[in-house]
Image (tube, rainbow, N blue to C red):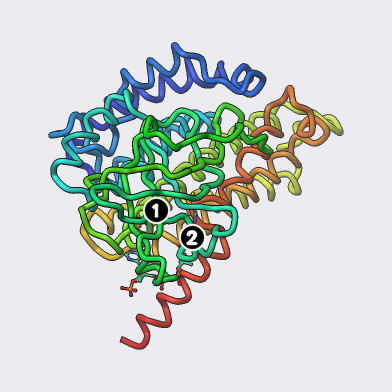
């Protein structure tokens, strides 16, 4: 759903200018230094990127899913690390509060998240609990007015910068499944939290992940999301479901960018006396990529519209995440192929994207997890 096309178009065209004039020229610097310059972060806050999904009454832009997808298609036109900076705050880090938090919790945190004053991270994954998220071992044991949290969370995006964590922990140690898990808002400055060293990753330099370690960390009971125990896994699943459409949109945007770069190169690059774009085998690489980008774009917009209509989009969200991330990987591979030897060199930039996009098939649910979700839903729907 697009609420007001004119306002959205104005926002998207100023974002497009910002991406082209500020972010694209900074890509190499960020890749070299692993740091997004402060002035760029400031501008991202001013534009409102940290408040995209926060409702207007809490100071955000309150975008619908379809509008958010449009913004992510635009953000995909540059290195994915820029999106990552605010992605956990507008996405998985804050959505649990928005979806299941109490009015007090929303009023306290959402306005600070919307301005970017506070960064949110999503702490679900653990060393021994990745795809099998419901098996998480971090415990939160009630002790008077507090919960005592112990455990380690792994690969937590933006944890070195986070002011709050949406933490999933087991409040009922006798229930080893999803029903024993609760979600909390944990403030970074709570004693007993430490952040591990920043992970060295294959790509997405400028976006930081690290372990978050909880040692006898006393979290006030009022920080339990929705003040309800045993709901944390469902909160996490709902958050991830929305996140999967968001990530799929980014995959489409980045694929468009890589394909445009590859197309430009194929037109400029001459071999056998003509542009390599004139050769049918190169044309096949371009055409297959274009068709797949278009298919993924249509899927993501369709899923977003259905979600805005209030329909159950569990299957669609996983289809989008699976198809768009795999498509993005194929486009990256073809783009490197079109660049030939130059595709292997850092100075042409495409190898950086090739490494960056590999993550899309892994995080917020691997391709194999999306397959499980899709097939399980098909079987369930058939039986109904
Ligand atoms: N919305 C609302 N509720 C949901 C849901 C959704 N999208 N998905 C699952 N649930 C509910 C189920 O209905 C079930 O509730 P009941 O017990 O009341 O029936 C509960 O959550 C447990 O669900 P399920 O039985 O499907 O859990 P499983 O342990 O089988 O796990 C998968 C399901 C594998 C899909 C889940 O663990 C998963 O998504 N794993 C990947 C995690 C991930 O994406 N990690 C990325 C880290 S964050 S970057």
Task: Look at 21% across and 57% down and name the residue there.
Answer: 309
Q: Is residue 117 above or below residue 303?
A: above
Front in this rendered view, residue 330 or 382: 382
Q: Position of residue 147 (x, y in %)?
A: 32, 50
Q: State the residue lying farthest toward the top.
A: 39
Q: Is mark 2 within 8 Å of ligand 1?
A: no
| Residue position for label 2 | 136
Label 1: few (<14), some (14–19) or many (≥20) C-alpha neighbours in 10 Å: many
In front of the other: 180 or 370: 180
Q: Residue at x 55, y 51 (%)?
A: 325
User: Residue 176 is drawn in which quadrant?
Assistant: bottom left
For the point 45% across and 52% down, the residue is 124
Q: Is residue 294 visible?
A: yes
Q: Secondary structure at mark 2?
A: loop
Residue under the image location 40 percent in, 34 percent down: 191
Residue sitting nearer the eye, 358 or 251: 358
**Crowding at label 2, few (<14), some or many (≥20) Cα neighbours within 10 Å?**
many
Asked if the residue under mark 2 is in contact with the one under mark 1, i.e. CB atoms within 8 Å, the reply is yes
28 on left or right of 305? right
Quarter holding the C terminus? Answer: bottom left
Residue 12 percent coordinates (x, y)? 33, 29
Q: Relative to 35, is 74 on the left or the right?
A: left
Which labelled disc corresponds to residue 278? none
Q: Position of residue 56 (x, y in %)?
A: 16, 34
Which residue sits furthest front? 144
Q: Residue 168's mark?
A: 1
Q: Is 30 above or below relative to 218?
A: above
Q: Is residue 298 visible?
A: no
The span from disc 1 to disc 2 (Cα, nearest Å) is 8 Å
């Amino acid at each position: 759903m697009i609420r007001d096309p004119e306002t959205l178009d104005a926002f998207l065209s100023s974002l497009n200018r910002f991406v082209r004039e500020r972010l694209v020229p900074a890509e190499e610097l960020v890749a070299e230094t692993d740091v997004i310059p402060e002035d760029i972060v400031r501008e991202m806050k001013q534009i409102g990127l940290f408040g995209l999904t926060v409702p207007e009454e809490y100071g955000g832009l309150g975008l619908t899913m379809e509008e958010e997808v449009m913004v992510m298609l635009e953000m995909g036109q540059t290195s994915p690390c820029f999106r990552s900076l605010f992605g956990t705050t507008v996405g998985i880090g804050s959505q649990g509060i928005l979806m299941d938090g109490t009015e007090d919790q929303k009023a306290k945190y959402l306005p600070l998240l919307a301005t970017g004053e506070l960064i949110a991270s999503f702490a679900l994954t653990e060393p021994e609990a990745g795809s099998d998220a419901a098996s998480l071992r971090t415990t939160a044991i009630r002790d008077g007015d507090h919960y005592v949290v112990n455990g380690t969370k792994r690969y937590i995006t933006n944890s070195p910068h986070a002011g709050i964590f949406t933490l999933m922990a087991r409040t009922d140690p006798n229930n080893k499944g999803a029903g024993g898990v609760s979600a909390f808002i944990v403030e970074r400055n709570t004693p007993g939290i430490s952040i591990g060293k920043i992970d060295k990753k294959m790509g997405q330099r400028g976006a930081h992940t690290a372990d978050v370690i909880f040692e006898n960390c006393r979290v006030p009971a009022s920080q339990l999301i929705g003040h309800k125990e045993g709901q944390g896994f469902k909160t996490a699943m709902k958050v991830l479901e929305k996140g999967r459409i968001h990530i799929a949109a980014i995959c489409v945007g980045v694929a468009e960018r890589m394909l445009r770069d590859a197309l430009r190169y194929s037109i400029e690059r001459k071999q056998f006396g003509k542009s390599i774009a004139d050769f049918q085998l190169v044309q096949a690489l371009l055409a297959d990529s274009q068709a797949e980008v278009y298919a993924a774009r249509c899927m993501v917009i369709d899923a977003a519209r259905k979600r805005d209509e209030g329909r159950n989009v569990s299957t669609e969200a996983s289809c989008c995440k699976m198809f768009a991330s795999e498509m993005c990987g194929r486009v990256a591979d073809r783009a490197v192929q079109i660049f030939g030897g130059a595709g292997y060199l850092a100075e042409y930039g495409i190898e950086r994207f090739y490494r960056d996009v590999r993550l899309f098939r892994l995080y917020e649910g691997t391709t194999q997890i999306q397959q499980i979700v899709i097939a399980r839903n098909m079987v369930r729907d058939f039986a109904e």
